[in-house]
Amino acid sequence: MKEKHTVEDVKNKSVYVSTYGCQMNINDSERMYSLLEMANYTPVSTPDQASLIIINSCSVREKPVHKVHSEVGRYRKLKQKNPNLKIGVAGCVAQQEKKKLFKDVPNLDFVFGPDNIDELPSLVSRLEQGDEKFVSARFDHQKPYQIETLIRNPGVASFVNITKGCDNFCTFCVVPFTRGRERSRNLKALITDINALTKRGVKEITLLGQNVNSYKSDCGVGFSGLLKAVAEDTNVERIRYTTSHPKDFDRELAEVMQKYREKICDYVHLPVQSGNSEVLERMNRGYTREEFIDKALMIKECIPGVSFSSDIIVGFPGETEKQFEDTLTLLDEVQFDSIYAYKYSARPFTKAAKFEDQLTEKEKTARLHKLFDYHNVIATRLSRKFVGTTLKVLIETFDEKTGRVMGRSSQNKVVHCVGDKKLIGQTVDVKVIQAFAQTLRGELVSQKL
Ligand code: SAH
Ligand code: SF4
Ligand code: F3S
């Protein structure tokens, strides 16, 4: 890090938040900035300008945990230069480690969990009053999940939390321990929230939760009902959601997606994790290989042309070469447009961490490479199918250097084409001329300036 700023440059109350992990954390960091802005903190874009640094951490795999430790280490010099600098760790590592973090990470001033973000203004005032090395990481399981989305400058696309926590306890996953029990937001409050965002120019919202399709409003409405209400009772142009769990994905949901296809995007992220039923059983996923394939076929039948993506873990404890190959053949059967694949990483508190037959790093790495190579062929073939077609693309950004705009199609394909800054926020027709495995290049068909 270049330390071109002096202590004098550091504003009295300025905050930098560094974010790891999933969309929930991205949304949570935005919430922290909003809350601190209300408490007279100025958000800054580099840590050396800040009087307060928060690391919003992720603990889903081992590597992101290491990143937190090394990032706080890097701030040692800043702290020597400015003894008033305060450093906090938030997010899932904070929830998992709590006060243990002070022992491992000496420069730390405070720790707070994902359920304590709204206390941030009072936590920073404790810091200002000289309180040090404190933790706020308690879940209030009785409290209903009532929040309002806080985003300082919503762009074209925004995330909206609909549930928090997870009750599924997949045997590899730390999330139920770091995010607590599952809770859903009230349906009416969500609609009001989304309407407020669209009034501020938001065109696309992504409904967020660890397991969105187990959403249950206090008035009894489930996830399909929520999607229907968002499609009917708000002006949002596009609706996405993530993540849906295969065991809870029913025909009703696919039918609602098809019925409101103009608004609800043609894209389903359906994490399979493994293509072998025995592994799935030991993962406690709640479905077999065959059931997953049947579900994917049902969705494709209800929503012709729908795109799929998935999460996959390789090298789960005890996974044999043959069982791993079942994951490869599943890719042939389901044809995911993209995959997010990871080497299994043993996590604290989880059942699988205690399973016998943990694989070596070398075995896991070899399987991961094999999986990506195998999928790359499929992804490229699927992507090429778009060449010559015209897609509706919601433009999100403009790059001055290249003169190109970037947006996504309903199928979540990233599309680049020559365009104008004024197109940001508009849905335009783009004819695809070239396909890569993950992105498409096209040209504008109509331009509504
Ligand atoms: N709620 C979502 C996913 C949350 S975590 C779901 O149920 O699908 C995102 C992804 O991280 C998971 O889908 C899984 O593929 C991966 N993951 C979770 N725990 C992991 C672990 N211990 N090792 C490797 N990958 C893991
Ligand atoms: Fe983790 Fe499973 Fe819950 Fe997803 S559904 S967050 S993988 S426990
Ligand atoms: Fe990571 Fe926590 Fe999200 S573990 S993936 S930041 S829920």
Image: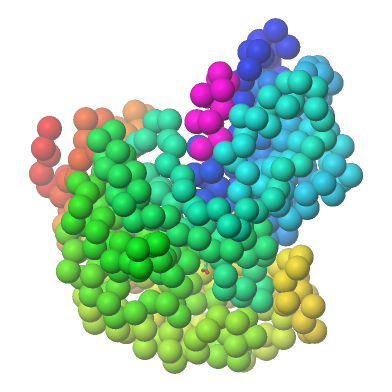
- Please state the total of marks drawn on the protein image: 0
Vertically, is 176 above or below 231? below
User: 396 or 255, which lies in front?
Assistant: 255
Horizontal and vertical percent position of residue 293: 40, 86
- Residue 300 lies left or right of residue 319; in this view the side is left
Residue 439 visible somewhere in the drawing: no
Q: Which residues are magenta?
A: 31-46
Vertically, is 395 above or below 337? above
Residue 142 visible somewhere in the drawing: yes
Residue lying furthest right: 103
Within the magenta stretch, is there residue 393? no
Horizontal and vertical percent position of residue 65: 73, 52
Q: Residue at x 31, y 39 (%)?
A: 197
User: 319 or 171, which lies in front?
Assistant: 171
Horizontal and vertical percent position of residue 327: 53, 83
Residue lying furthest top: 8
Q: Residue at x 40, y 66 (%)?
A: 216
Horizontal and vertical percent position of residue 250: 34, 79
Q: Give the quadrant of residue 155.
A: top left
Vertically, is 75 above or below 253? above
User: 328 or 40, which lies in front?
Assistant: 40
- Residue 420 lies left or right of residue 291; in this view the side is left
On-image quarter of the N terminus: top right
Q: Residue at x 52, y 24 (%)?
A: 37
Q: Give the quadrant of residue 33.
A: top right
Within the magenta stretch, is there residue 37? yes
On-image quarter of the C terminus: top left
